[in-house]
Each structure stands twice: as structure tokens, then as C-alpha cells.
Image (cartoon, rainbow, N blue to C red):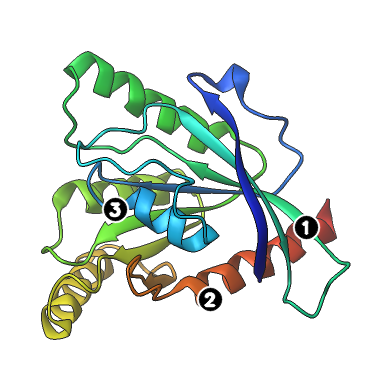
Amino acid sequence: MEIISARLVSCSADLHSLPRPHLPEYAFVGRSNVGKSSFINMLTGQHMLAKISATPGKTQTINHYLIESRPDPLHRIRRGSWYLVDLPGYGYARQSIQQRKKWEQLIHAYLQQRKNLVYTFLLIDSSIPPQAIDLAFADQLGNWQIPFVLIFTKTDKEKQQLVHKHVQAFLAEMQARWDQLPPHFMASAKKKTGRTEILDFIQEWNTRFQAIA
């Protein structure tokens, strides 16, 4: 897939103000300091699309980015549109408990009710050992029967041996209570690792969405 353009079209504080659900949609979610904004910028090829902050919890609304793409550079005419959705981070953030609870309820409502949501991408920090809050969120997605993919971020932050150890430990934790593991990708915003594979995955599901629409 080749990204032609990407722009922010909606910042929603509730489900009533979301864009019309007529395009395939992919949500990105993770702990507040997982590197989500950097990853989104890398994936879309636009360095300033999602605002990067040193303060966890910067994203406070459901942000819809309209993406225009084509299957590959040779398909000059055939274009497609889809939504990339940046969800508020869960876990630590310098906000009140009440505000964090509000974000949590908003995320949960969106994930369970959005009809055109094709896949949710759950971002996991590969530079640290498995976190209980990430495993719990993955389990919750499974309980809701929401299709999701694991993306292990920050693969360039530590030695590859340690990154591999953390990833395998996370998958082993899931394997203990899951019959089948979800797909997973390794990613680095700095080195652009995983970009091609993830965009190809999205292109495949865009095609399936269009076939049944």
C-alpha cells in the first residue's frame, strides 16, 4: 500500500460526534506512553500528523484521520479511503481518576459499538517486560470478540535479545489462556520497521470490506 494523503478530520469526545461509519476503520490503542503518536506518524509517512508529547495522556479524544491510499505505486488510478483512529491511551496519565475513568468508558463504548471497525491494533512496549494492564486489555478485547492485532513498539530501544525475550514472554502469558493468539507485528518508529507489513495487512482487509459493502 502507498499512502497518498492523511489528514485529521474529527476529534470526538463522545460517540454521537463520530464521522459517518461508511469507510473501513482501524483503531490504534495502547498504554499512555507506548509511543502511539510516533508510530502513527511513521505508518502514515507524515511526521507532524499526530502530536508527540513527553507527557503521557496527550490524546484525550477519539481522533479520526482520513487516509487516501492505493494498493501500490503502479495503481495510479485505483484509490481507496479509510479511517485511522487514534484512541486515548489507557493506564498512567497526569489526569484525575475521574477523567481517566471517562476515557476508559469512551474507549470501551467505541470498541463495542462502532460498526465499521475492521481491526483494533493494540500497541505493546517491547522494551519492557509484559505489563498486567496490557494483558488485561487484550483479554477484554477477546471477551468482547473484537478482532485485534498486537504491535510491539520500540523494538530499537533495547538489544534485540532483550526485545525478543519481552515479546516471547508476552505471547507466552497470552498462550496460557488463549486457544489461538492474534497476529502480531514488530515495529520501530525510528527505523520504520513493520510499516510495509502492517500497511499490507490493512490493504488486505480494505479489499475484504469493499467486497461485502
Q: Residue at x 14, y 78 (%)?
A: 165
Q: Residue at x 25, y 41 (%)?
A: 32
Amino acid bearing label 1 = Gly
Amino acid bearing label 2 = Thr
Q: Which mark is residue 80?
A: 1
Q: CA distance from mark 3 to mark 1?
A: 27 Å
Write down the residue under mark 3. Answer: 35
Image quadrant where residue 191 sits: bottom left
Which residue is most to the front?
48
Determine whether the residue tagged by mark 3 lies in a helix, strand or loop: loop
Q: CA distance from mark 1 to mark 2?
A: 17 Å
Position above or below: 91 against 142: above
Position above or below: 131 against 103: below
The mark nearer the N terminus, 3 or 1, is: 3
Residue 28 lies, in percent from the top left, at: 44, 49
Amino acid bearing label 3 = Gly
Residue 69 lies, in percent from the top left, at: 71, 61
Crowd rating for badge 3 (residues with CA inside 10 Å; few <14, some 14–19, many 20+): many
Write down the residue under mark 2. Answer: 196
